[in-house]
Amino acid sequence: MSAPKRIGVLTAGGDCPGLNAAIRGVAKTAIVEYGMEVLGFTAGYSGLIRKEYIKLEQSMVSGILTLGGTILGTSREKPFKMVDGEPNKPEIIKQNYKELGLDCLVCIGGNGTMKTAWKLSQLGLNVIGIPKTIDNDVWGTDITFGFDSAVAIATEAIDRLHTTANSHQRAMVIEVMGHHAGWIALYAGLAGGGDIILIPELEYNIGKVCKFIEERFAANKPYSIIVVAEGIKVPKKGITAGQFIAENVQLFTGIETRETRLGYIQRGGSPTPMDRILATRYGAYAAGLIAENKFGKMVAIKGNNLTAVPLEEVGGKLSLVKADNSLVKKARNMGISFGD
Ligand code: F6P
């Protein structure tokens, strides 16, 4: 009989709700279903470089399903980014992987993490990726966990802005995260009843944004909610996307305008039930792939089916909102403006 498999797991990149649910999904399935041994590396790829890990027993991953953040910690360490004078980190990782007798490494993260995971698999390591990020911009999967929670938080914020916008008859700008992608702005904007949604994928015109707001006021709609993705282009340095839009709306329309930047609140706290389930499914599926000796893949969901896509196809690509996205079309048909 061959020895039970020994696997490593790490969480890398920005944190998001559901990371602990995914760690739990991997570890519990690996231990209970397949009798594997699980090592949790701390602080993303840094833990792998420094050989810092904890052996994850079943009891240690119990009670973490609802917890935000990650019990393993995270970092934005990019081991393949060579810096003069620094040791050869990929070689150190390879060595540590061997010395620890690992059969596979599960890397839970976003685009950057998947790119590193792919490079590690090219070095000969067995790797499985699990896609997470509030931005929902990982290529190869319909959805990443963390996104639903961020949308829920941003939607609640927009709901709250409605009442104050209405009371003061103001234009309210809310800037949400998303990096280069407009997924959070699109979904939260629709769920929260935003009047204008600005996303990086659709080029806006500030004149059109202002005209739209003026027309709303003229039509007895005494307030406007403008949902802005952080990644939209602004023709000015040292100013955030939301600040730029708010400043210009007030300047050109004369309507009192206020700006809210939601920031890291979108990444914090307990995951939604949907994210708990998605992260759990991803984690369990990853353990199953390892049991079947299937490596070099990222776990993904297409429709409602779990699948695995080659890491090679994922690395370096982004999943962005397309102009013909059905939600964008529906929003336009309902009179929501994208400022274009
Ligand atoms: O990728 C998640 C994200 O929260 C983005 O939406 C945001 O642009 C970025 O991370 C912020 O990064 P940091 O945690 O390094 O400030």
Image (cartoon, helix red, strand yellow):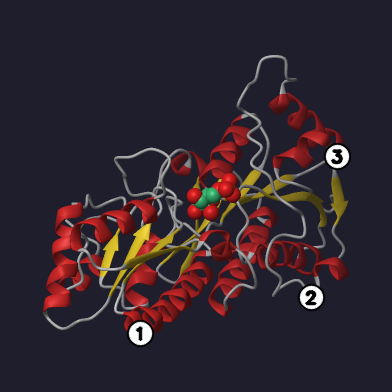
Asked whether the residues under the numbered discs 1 and 3 touch, taking CB atoms below 8 Å apart as contact, a structural biologist would say: no
Seen in the picture, residue 298 relative to 193 is either above or below; the reply is above
Please state which of the two labelled residues, at mark 1 or mark 2, is closer to the viewer: 1
Please name the residue that numbered disc 2 is placed on. Answer: 63
Disc 1 to disc 2, how far (Cα)? Answer: 43 Å
Disc 2 to disc 3, how far (Cα)? Answer: 27 Å
Sequence-wise, which precedes: disc 1 or disc 2?
Answer: 2
Q: For the point 19% across and 63% down, which residue is it?
A: 253
Please name the residue that numbered disc 3 is placed on. Answer: 100
Question: Which amino acid type corresponds to the residue marked 2 in the rendered image?
Answer: Gly
Side of 168 relative to 79 (left or right): left
User: Which of 327 and 58 lies nearest the eye of the viewer?
Assistant: 327
Secondary element at image label 3: loop
Q: Position of residue 44 (x, y in %)?
A: 71, 45
Please name the residue that numbered disc 1 is placed on. Answer: 167
Q: For the point 15% across and 83% down, which residue is it?
A: 220
The residue positioned farthest toward the top in the image shown: 85
Disc 1 to disc 3, how far (Cα)? Answer: 62 Å
The answer to whether the beta carbon of the residue marked 3 is less than 8 Å from any atom of ligand 1 is no
Query: Can residue 5 be seen in the rendering of this structure?
Result: no
Question: Which amino acid type corresponds to the residue marked 1 in the rendered image?
Answer: Ser
Sequence-wise, which precedes: disc 1 or disc 3?
Answer: 3
Image quadrant of residue 81? top right
Q: Position of residue 282 (x, y in %)?
A: 59, 63
Q: Position of residue 64 (x, y in %)?
A: 76, 71
Side of 249 relative to 148 (left or right): left
Side of 78 relative to 166 (left or right): right
